[in-house]
Amino acid sequence: MRYCRKCVYPDTRPEQVFDEEGVCDACRSAEKKCSDIDWQKRREELIKTLRQYKNEEGTWWDCIIPVSGGKNSCYQAYKMKYEYGMNPLLVNFIPCEMTDIGNRNLLFLRDLGFDIIQVGANRKIYREMSRKGFFDLGDCCWPEHIGLFTTPFKVAIQYNIPLIVYGENSQFEYGGPQSWREKNTLNRNWLEQFQMLGCRISDLIDEGVDKKDLLMFQYPSEEELKRVGVTAVFLGYYVFWDNKTQAEEMIKIGFEVNPDGPCEGGYFNFENLDCKWIGGLHDYMKFLKYGYGRATDQLCNEIRLGRLERDKALRLAKELEGKLPKKYHQDYLQFIRCTEKEYRDNLDKFTNKKIFKTYKNGNLVKDENGDVIKIDYGY
Ligand SMILES: [Zn+2]
């Protein structure tokens, strides 16, 4: 396992590219972001684009903003309405089990003057998809990752609102294939490449799931998209993206953060608040598969923006990540109807034995808390 020389990303991260100097592509993107990109020009481009969609008469909403109630998608909504004068309709894809804070942050958005549509997929299929995600794909939040991207497109078509505004371009901010890093739009190919984990919705139908149960997770047809002229853009292409500063701006006006401090496995207290499993179990499984979790993503951003030393970040990552999630553990077992033993065995199955210490017989070495131990923490 090798770490980027500038930040603390390991080379086990999927699609990560290190250059000949041992620096990851997310760090190279950050250099561009901080010095090469003309943000004033990008802002003008955005204003020009928005002008095409703006409903000057005030007779209808003029863009859709997908919001979770957890991360700072609130910022997107706020900026679009109060800085760019748009009239957004917010779309919230309800996670498996929303947290109280997630709900309160949606109320906060409505108090700020936003209309919102909440879309809740049926929980029977949600359970089946979360089980498939957990047991077969190593991602308990698989249904959310799909629904977050299919439902705003569905609402765009139903409500005849062609513009959808997403937040950061994660391939630019966190690294990914060159062809997607510089993009300002996303589409079906993007969804299939980054959110589906190599599995198609049609595979579920082949496995016996009723087609009718999957309607919320189906991306609209090309014909429907064309009829309305749907375009989805990343706001992060047009404005300098800085999660922390943006969150601070929202906290000042009433956005609620996690009262216990950083979310399980994270460094920040303002991300992944909306869903009971995303902050804990989802990020923990990522740690088992690739040897790094959400705290690393957040710490890397802090390094790239010059707010944190690399050495300190390595130590913080070790301290914050890789601990069995506790907060909503029993809720998850109940939700997917599985025993503690099945749960633990499945976590071991997804643990990458090249990254974690094992005994000679191949079994994982665990500490007194039952947590696995990385071979190399980078220092
Ligand atoms: Zn890096």
Image (cartoon, grey):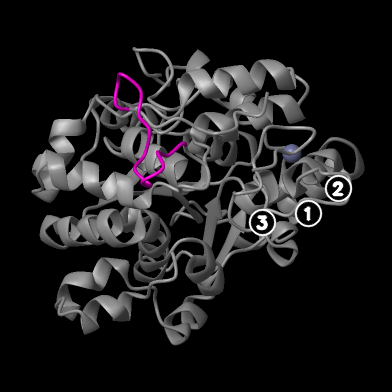
User: Which residue is identified by label 3?
Assistant: 176
Specify the quadrant that holds the C terminus.
top right
Residue type marked 2: Lys
> In the rendered structure, which segment of residues is drawn in magenta?
357-370
Q: In terms of depth relative to the viewer, which is nearer, 359 or 194?
A: 359
* Nearer to the camera, 242 or 359: 359
Circle 2: element type: helix
Residue placed furthest toward the bottom: 223
- Mark 1 vs mark 3, foreground winner is 3
| SS state under label 1 | helix
| Picture residue at 78% right of the left edge, 22% below the top | 306
Q: Residue reaching furthest right? A: 36
- Mark on residue 41? 2
Question: In this orientation, which residue lies closer to the viewer: 286 or 175?
Answer: 286
Q: CA distance from mark 1 to mark 3?
A: 24 Å
Residue hosting label 1: 45
Whether residue 150 is visible to the viewer of this picture, yes or no, is yes
Q: Quadrant of the N terminus?
A: top right
